[in-house]
Amino acid sequence: MFANIEDFLQELNSLKQELLPASKIEIVYRRVGKVSLRIFINKALFIDVYSNTDTARYDFSLIKDRKRIFGYDNLGGWHYHPLGKPDEHIKCKRPSLKYILKEMAALVLEL
């Protein structure tokens, strides 16, 4: 998806401003090739994000009341965890970062 963490963070921040402008990004930790962060919508709702550009590993989870309610990741190949059935794995083609955040932003508006 991305050659380095800086490119990932730049696009993520740009998309956050476009799709979830009232949200706030908090970096949990950052290393040379990886980052873990949260995009806070409110106290009980956030998007948990993990990116490792060295291994091309990505994980995006919509968390509500401390439980994943929806998500995308590529552990074992790209798949998503549908709303209401977060333990299911539905295979999909590699989505763009914009596609993932657009889908999560739409869900946030419904919650």
Image: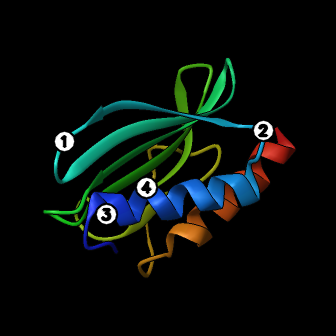
Residue 80 spot, x, y in % from top left: 48, 61
Residue type at mark 3 is Asn
4 or 2: tag closer to the N-terminus: 4
Q: Residue 31 shows which numbered tag?
A: 1
3 or 4: tag closer to the N-terminus: 4
Q: Residue furthest right?
A: 110
Real-space CA distance between mark 2 and mark 1, rounded to the nearest whole angstrom: 27 Å
Q: Quadrant of residue 58?
A: bottom left
Single out the mark in the foreground, 2 or 3: 2
Residue at 85% x, 45% y: name it.
Answer: 110
Real-space CA distance between mark 3 and mark 4, rounded to the nearest whole angstrom: 18 Å
Residue type at mark 2 is Ala
Coloration of the structure image: rainbow
Residue at 60% x, 71% y: name it.
Answer: 99
Residue type at mark 1 is Arg
Question: Do residues under tags 2 and 3 come within 8 Å of each other at their CB atoms?
Answer: no
2 or 3: tag closer to the N-terminus: 2
Examine the rendering and report whether any part of residue 89 can be seen: no
**Residue position for label 2:** 22
Q: Residue 74 shows which numbered tag?
A: 3
